[in-house]
Amino acid sequence: MVASENIGRLAHLPASHGSDIRGASLWEAAHDVPSYPRLDGMIETDVLVIGAGFTGLSAALKLRHEGVSVSIVEAGQPGAGASGRNSGLVIPMLSRSDPDDIVQRYGASGERFVALLRDCADDLFATATALRLGKQAEQNGWLQPAHTPGRMALIAQRAAQWSKWGAAVEVVDRLEARDMLGSEMWFGGLLCRSGGAVNPLALVQAMAEEVRRIGGNIYAQTPALSFTRRANAWQVATPLGEVRARSLIIATNAYTAAASKALLPGVAREIVPVTSWLAATDPLPEAIRCSVLPTRLAMSDTRGDLHFARYDVNDRLISGGRSSIRSTVQPGFESWFNSGSRGFGRKFAASASGSSGMDGSE
């Protein structure tokens, strides 16, 4: 067990330094996994989607609403990849490229992409509401605080550009940021009111259940091994069966080579795995919650290896960081993890200790 005493005890590390970091995630530990069948035999469908993450499930929902028959094959369970394992911060902009840069480089396509980014948080929370996610999705805003005074110039430029494109953003000064964050360690920031936080695995599972409810088929533990085009149809091989489809959507993204290196080797070669970690405190008492992120907004700052934090539905404070490009937890990770989590915890030490009687020691 590692601890950051100023904000509460953190979750357990993996059992051993050599263990695969794709064990049960923070979100999986709190969720039952719905049961989906494996594909056994041959089926036909209008559209086959490979991958049951956000991309594949969104496509399947769209197709079913248009009356198209659709089936999904998933190598694990829906949300087993990055869609169900991320921090759940909902941020309707990019970390580096701002609207003017995007439009200058991509023209009309860039304009459409900027509009998509501007509206994506509202669209996501509308989807969460339609799927009855309740408090698993909180649209309380997202704040990007500046970690140095010089970063406030970037914040002002970013706010001006996004405001020009109709986004609900504003610059907050250091005192306003302090009141929103419960810490004086930042120098102001960019507030985006459409942002927030969601339980990503809960959202994936709700989307998958909706696909099934409206007539789509989902087959779990069914990796796509290869595909060919024959007689005006796609034929996709799986370990125990085969799918024939008029159209094919490959939505495997970072996991394209996870089950079969023959699926799309060109795409697989373009993937560079950059892993990250999440940690959660125990549920925090109200006295601390009133001082640490008291407005329950989500935040991620202007660092390259950014600091971020958010609450979940159980009042756990969740944070994390980047680890390595390796696929396993390496020796020395626990020491590094302790250092990173405690360093971030120091930013809230004064407010947490003042509200809870803790001394903020590490």
Image (tube, rainbow, N blue to C red):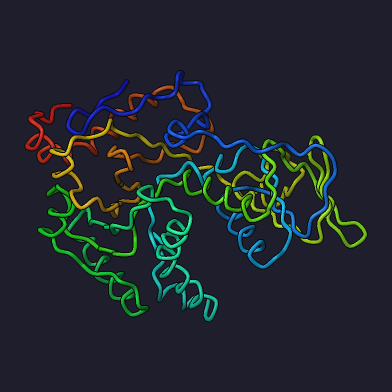
Q: Left or right: where does residue 176 sit relative to residue 44?
A: left
Q: Nearer the viewer, residue 120 or 159?
A: 120
User: At 93% across and 60% down in the image, what residue appears?
Assistant: 231
Q: In the figure, 243 relative to 346: above or below? A: below
Q: In the figure, 8 relative to 213: above or below? A: above
**Could you say where residue 199 lies in the image, as x and y percent from the top left?**
41, 46
- Name of the residue lying farthest toward the right: 231
Q: Residue 67: name its quadrant.
A: bottom right
Q: Residue 26: name its quadrant.
A: top left
Q: Nearer the viewer, residue 78 or 300?
A: 78
User: At 45% across and 44% down in the image, what residue appears?
Assistant: 86
**Could you say where residue 193 lies in the image, as x and y percent from the top left?**
29, 64
Q: In the figure, 314 relative to 123: above or below? A: above
- Name of the residue lying farthest toward the top: 16
Q: Left or right: where does residue 302 sit relative to residue 29?
A: left
Quadrant the N terminus occupies: top left
**Could you say where residue 335 lies in the image, as x and y percent from the top left?**
33, 24
Q: Left or right: where does residue 15 sit relative to residue 351?
A: right
**Could you say where residue 248 lies in the image, as x and y percent from the top left?**
75, 57
